[in-house]
Image (cartoon, helix red, strand yellow):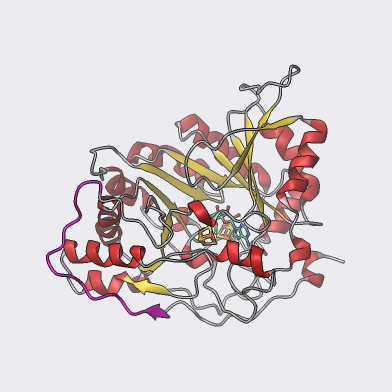
Amino acid sequence: MTERDTHRVIPLQDQRRQSFALPAVAGGWLPAANPQVTDQRGRALRDLRISVTDRCNFRCNYCMPKEIFDAQYAYLPHSALLSFEEITRVARQFVALGVQKIRLTGGEPLLRKNLEQLVEQLASLRTPDGLPLDLTLTTNGSLLARKARALKTAGLQRVTVSLDGLDDAVFRRMNDVDFPVSEVLAGIEAAAAAGLGPIKINMVVKRGTNEHQVLPMARHFRGSGMVLRLIEYMDVGATNGWRLTDVLPSGDVVKLINAELPLLPLEPSSPGETAGRWGYADAGGQHDKVAGEIGVISSVTQAFCGGCNRARLSTEGQLYLCLFAQQGYDLRSLIRAATPDADLASTISQIWQARDDRYSELRSALGPDTGAGVTRVEMSYIGG
Ligand code: SAM
Ligand code: SF4
Ligand code: SF4
């Protein structure tokens, strides 16, 4: 029986245009240098993920199942998308409020035409301390071989490439468009050659689908200077028919790798880090820095909402405060109404200060049916 036979695909209800009312703007407000905007749980605003397109050339079953994202699916028209100038303007306000890291995502971000121009604009932004941003991008790697050099020249610092296995048949089945793994591996090599490192490799592990690819992936990337990150399959969006039984807990993934390639726990490298770090051990039980490390992202079995400092800007300019949110805040309406920068920054600041989201923590406390009956936005729209 194939994964498709056992997979329940849930019809899509369009949540894209449901927005909360925007807070009233206190006129003339300007962010002070280093304003340290924090939310209701004391979490600073540090990380902004920007979805630059809702389209993708893959149909990973856990994200954009073919049955829903088919030829009839209504993607956003070009006029609905934020332009590069609009994205840069809104990003500038986020940076004034404390954002230090911007990740471009999607959909598949490299499908957005002339993306290097956006990268160039974002690379020119500076934090209130005058520092450049940590500017990065998550991609399925399919177009990376062609685009790596231009992205680097435009000012992109590094990339994360998603790769769910090394076995060609498994990989083609998971991307569901018969895309060969060799082209993604060539994209990763091109990114490394262009200096877009340290490169991270994201692997979503689905029980019974690609768990047998965990060890080959660990062997392949051990000692490469790249960090393999193993991600628990999440109940994000509303169409992937997620079941808890499909999740392979990170604890099991670590055990699996540790049995052949001994690991030891490492300290988090920064506050709010989503991945648990494990280093490869040498014969003396110390961290072998040449062999490197892996990361595990345990969004299902170990909630990390306590340090979540990420905001998400959707393809059409909705601000989301959580990956599992049902509604966003329509910043595009403000941008297109020629709202002054100070008012835009004030609105974002007020929205962040009222934030109380902690979906994964609630799911851990209340059980896997926490989101049952609720229609959340898709990851391809909100950005992973
Ligand atoms: N298309 C790009 C890519 O695949 O890298 C960027 C967008 S994709 C939505 C961002 C990340 O989300 C990818 O690493 C993908 O594997 C991950 N992702 C998507 N759906 C997921 C799910 N249900 N559970 C866990 N991770 C998921
Ligand atoms: Fe496309 Fe990335 Fe989603 Fe796969 S995970 S369907 S590559 S957006
Ligand atoms: Fe952040 Fe929401 Fe994920 Fe918690 S569930 S870590 S608040 S995005």
| In the image, farthest residue toward the right | 1
Q: Quadrant of residue 376?
A: bottom right
Query: x%, y% of residue 337?
Result: 20, 74
In the figure, 153 relative to 242: above or below? Answer: above
| In the image, farthest residue toward the left | 28
Front one among 153 and 85: 85
Query: x%, y% of residue 45?
Result: 37, 54
Q: Quadrant of residue 347?
A: bottom left
In the figure, 365 relative to 239: above or below? Answer: above
Is 119 magenta? The answer is: no
Query: x%, y% of residue 383?
Result: 48, 60
Query: x%, y% of residue 39?
Result: 38, 60
Front one among 96 and 106: 96
| In the image, farthest residue toward the top | 284
Is 32 magenta? The answer is: yes
Give, as a single range, the part of the protein colored magenta: 18-34
Q: Is residue 54 visible to the viewer in this orientation of the structure?
A: no
Front one among 30 and 94: 30
Front one among 321 and 222: 321
Relative side of 299 to 354, left or right = right
**Ligand 1 positioned in quadrant:** bottom right
Q: Quadrant of residue 265?
A: top right
Residue that appears at 75% across and 54% down? 248
Q: Is residue 115 visible to the viewer in this orientation of the structure?
A: yes
Relative side of 293 to 173, left or right = left
In the figure, 18 relative to 233: above or below? Answer: below
Count up the numbered dots. Answer: 0
Residue that appears at 66% across and 42% down? 182
Magenta stretch, main secondary structure, is loop
Relative side of 77 to 281, left or right = left
The quarter of the rendered structure image containing the N terminus is: bottom right
